[in-house]
Image: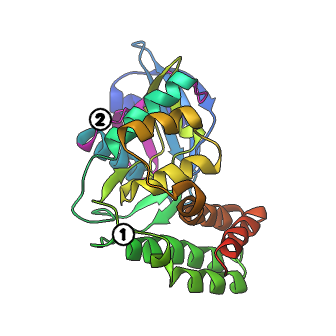
Amino acid sequence: MLEIVREQIQQITGCRATQTRQLGGGCIGEVYRVTLDDGRSMVAKVGDGSGAALDIEGYMLRYLRVNSRLPVPEVIYDSDKLLLMEFIEGYSHLSAGAERHAAELLAALHSVRGERFGLERDTLIGGLHQPNTMYSEWVPFFREQRLLYMGGEALKSGRLPKAVMQRLERFAEHLERWLEEPDYPALIHGDMWTTNILAMGDQITGFVDPAIYYAHPEIELAFSTLFHTFGSDFFERYHELRPIETGFFEIRRDIYNLYPLLVHVRLFGGGYVGAVEQILRKFGY
């Protein structure tokens, strides 16, 4: 397989791959750092045959480069089975300064306005299909395209019990009790956890593996707390730039984190079902 990939890279770049080193990460295939004979380095993602299309990731990275100032790798080539990207130096370890820099970058990203919630095409999250049918209102979009869709996928996979899905459906009927419409649809990265962020010292060098759409920015902020991506330095700086409304940490964060938790239920099952149930119980369901 690697030999075939090396041949493809030579055809695309006109240069021979002299070194190939496997990198961590990659939900839908293997990831390699490739060094070419002209000295350049790039990242190659190679499809694992699961059917997930790497050209969708290429589309999302290009979209962010065109429509925002978020630092993302330049896409050199993309197809359904191969994605070649610029190699970005950095580590997924964030200093206090890097957290503040991330807050500035994401606050700027969240100021990018769309006409409606969703996106012009469907995307991926963690290798899973992510529907983006466009809505004029946020709460119905979140209900239908995020909670009920991913809950349904987790149910079909056999990883979410039917009784929990029924509780989720009853809860989703009443989201307006706790959620409000934002001022506008904001562009988000969509998969904000630590290994998708690269930093050197106090500077963020890049964001990778996006799951973009136009949303309420709070869903991005919530996701970043689920696996402790950011701490107080990030939130203090973000709040200075884009004030976080009262009740986010106490109430809305848990509601928005139901979506990434359902993604994890669909992928892994296990203890993530209990995390979903805990949030449903918190709100009386």
Q: Whole-percent x and y of residue 2?
A: 57, 36
Which image quadrant for residue 167? bottom right
Q: In this view, does 247 lie above or below 59?
A: below
Q: Residue 69 carries which label?
A: 2
> What amino acid is found at the position of numbered circle 2 in the picture?
Arg
Give, as a single range, the part of the protein colored magenta: 67-95
Residues at marks 2 and 1 touching, judged by CB atoms closer than 8 Å:
no
Q: Whole-percent x and y of residue 252?
A: 53, 62
Q: Is residue 30 above or below residue 276?
A: above
Residue at 60% from the left image edge and 48% from the top image edge: 225
User: Is residue 89 one of those drawn in magenta?
Assistant: yes
Residue 8 seen in render: no
> What amino acid is found at the position of numbered circle 1 in the picture?
Trp
Predominant SS of the magenta segment: loop
User: Is residue 81 one of those drawn in magenta?
Assistant: yes
Q: Give whichever of 146, 107 is nearer the camera.
A: 107
Image quadrant where one finds the C terminus = bottom right
Q: In this view, does 164 lie to the left or right of 63?
A: right
Q: In this view, does 8 lie above or below 98?
A: below
Q: Give whichever of 2, 134 is nearer the camera.
A: 134
Q: Is residue 56 left or right of residue 152?
A: left
Q: What element carries label 1?
A: helix
Q: Residues within 10 Å of mark 1 (few under 14, many from 20)?
A: many
Distance from Cα at disc 2 to Cα at disc 1? 24 Å
Residue at 64% from the left image edge and 75% from the top image edge: 283
**Residue on which the image places disc 1:** 138
Q: Which tag, 2 or 1, sits closer to the chain's start? A: 2
Q: Kindly report which numbered mark, 2 or 1, lies closer to the viewer in this rendering.
A: 1
Residue 203 seen in render: yes
Residue at 36% from the left image edge and 49% from the top image edge: 60
Q: Which colour scheme is used?
A: rainbow
